[in-house]
Amino acid sequence: MHDSGSESSNLSAVERAAALMEQADALIVAAGAGMGVDSGLPDFRGKEGFWRAYPALREARLDFYSVASPAAFHSLPERAWGFYGHRLALYRKTVPHHGFEFLKRWGSQIFHGLSVFTSNVDGQFQKAGFDQSRIHECHGSIHHLQCLEPCHQGIWSADGFQPDVDEQTCRLLNPTPFCPHCGGLARPNVLMFGDGGWVDRRSAAQG
């Protein structure tokens, strides 16, 4: 049965949103994991969603909270980097969906433009051509590295690291990245669970 009342209500909500945007001097886009789904990126919703994306971790009975932690890098760095290395390679080859272009177009029509506040670490807004100076990544970026310890507060690009991951076992096959200062293990510059060692200088500077 067609619900014309519901359709009318939805339409008026869209119209109200459009009217508010027309009056706005600036636009702030707040984006989470759902933003990348239409680009084909997994959102790790619940254990089952996570294990569908990483079946090798299902066999090991490791959930997202367990592997996305500094402890995982200390206990088995090849597996931790297998997970993050696979994500890094995936984000590098992913093409942002058309929704990013729609947002850029809206932002270009507003006097003070558009800024982005995102908990995503995938770098898709930068890849879609958004102004980097107007993007705040509150959980950091997988495209940057830091020392696991950390021995210092430096952050550097992950561009030189090309992960070779065995997807059947979720293990990194090539050497792990290392800290240029102490020679110890490097990790992604992203905020993980139970993370007391995240270097937040880059994210703080974006704010």
Image: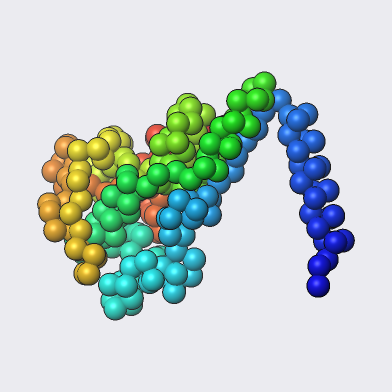
Q: Is residue 194 left or right of residue 74?
A: right
Residue at the far front: name it: 1
**Which residue is depicted at the point 59% across and 43% down?**
30
Is residue 179 depicted above or below 25 in this figure?
below
Quarter occupied by the N terminus = bottom right
* Residue at (44, 74) in percent of width and height: 48
**41 shown above or below 127:** below
**In the rendered image, the vertical position of residue 22 relative to residue 169, given as above or below:** above
Residue sitting at x 29%, y 60%: 83
Q: Nearer the viewer, residue 98 or 44?
A: 98
Residue in view at x 55 percent, y 43 percent? 99
x and y, in percent, of residue 36 in the image: 48, 51
Position of 34 with respect to 75 (left or right) is right
Which of the 4 image quarters holds residue 58? bottom left
> Residue 9 is drawn in which quadrant?
bottom right
| Residue 18, image x, y percentages | 76, 38
The image shows residue 40 at horizontal and vertical percentages of 43, 55
Q: Which colour scheme is used?
A: rainbow
Q: Visible in this render: residue 74?
A: no
| Side of 37 relative to 192 (left or right) | right
Outermost residue to the top: 111
Q: In this view, does 4 lie to the left or right of 79?
A: right
Is residue 12 shown to the viewer in this render?
A: yes
Please count the marks in the image.
0
